[in-house]
Image (spheres, helix red, strand yellow):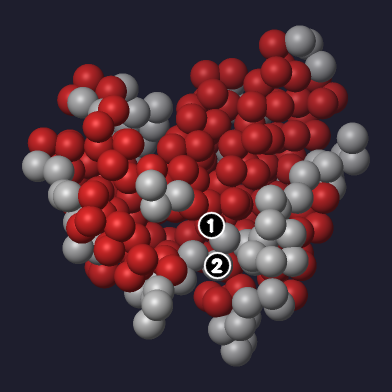
Amino acid sequence: MTSVDLGTPHRVPSTDELDAIAAVCAFLANLLLRVESAPEVVANLDATTIAAWPMAGRNEATRVGLNVLARAVEQPATTEELAADYRRLFVGPGPIAAPPWESVHVDEEGLMFQEPTMLVRHAYGEFGLQAPALNKEPDDHMGLELAFIGELAVAALHAAESGDVVGQATLVSGITRFWEEHLSVWGETLSSLVVDAARTDLYRALGHLLGGSIAAIGTILGR
């Protein structure tokens, strides 16, 4: 595995923190990537599971997001309302309220498949990973970026549990660098767009939890 040199020391997360990063990233990535996951999430959550959110109490955005998520579960939108909100926020047709691709937010012309997409692709490749629909869908979808961080967190957790100190350090460095160069650069922008434009509590909660989770991961990493 390729080593990663950040140049700046970073905090090494505990195994519980790595587990929390993996769980939160998987939850958010699922909602961002799959329109059909919304009714599944609502059906499978309750007050107990929401209270057990792995990063609860980390920041105000997360606290607000969990409160809105609880309301989404108590007063659920219909499947049709959730699907319509997802399409309007992330897919289209028509203007997309919260474009989920990094390039759109950081490229000067707001185009997809530009240099930011290629940098994300390279980051995946350093750890032997690639986007599932390579060259057909942009690699820099927020859902894919979170899934990547989650996979590295799981691998780092396994390395820690097996006593592989070097492997754990390399993976944590990869998480930290990707957070610094990608998630922290545009995550707050996307979070705000989702919060402002969402018409259902579930996706409004997603917006708050996205921003809160990216900030919390940074705190865990000592950033």
Query: Who's the residue at 14% across and 43% down the image?
Result: 76
Of mark 2 and mark 1, the one earlier in the sequence is: 2
Q: Where is residue 57 in the image (x, y as percent from the top left)?
A: 30, 32
Residue depicted at x 71% and y 27%: 155
Farthest residue to the front: give it.
80
Q: Please identify the quarter of the rendering in which residue 151 is found.
A: top right
212 to the left or right of 151: left
The residue labelled by disc 1 is 142
- From this view, report whether residue 47 is shown above or below residue 92: above
At 22% from the left edge and 41% from the top edge, which residue is drawn? 69
Q: Which amino acid does label 2 sit on?
A: Trp
The relative height of residue 187 versus residue 124 in the rendered view (above or below) is: below
Q: Residues within 10 Å of mark 1 (few under 14, many from 20)?
A: many
Give residue 172's position: percent from left, percent from top: 70, 35
Q: What element carries label 1?
A: helix
**Residue 27: x, y in percent?**
44, 38
Q: Which amino acid does label 1 sit on?
A: Met
Q: In which quarter of the image is the N terminus?
A: top right
Tags 2 and 1 in contact by the CB under 8 Å rule? yes
Q: Residue 101 carries which label?
A: 2
Q: Which of 136 and 147 is in front in this view?
A: 136
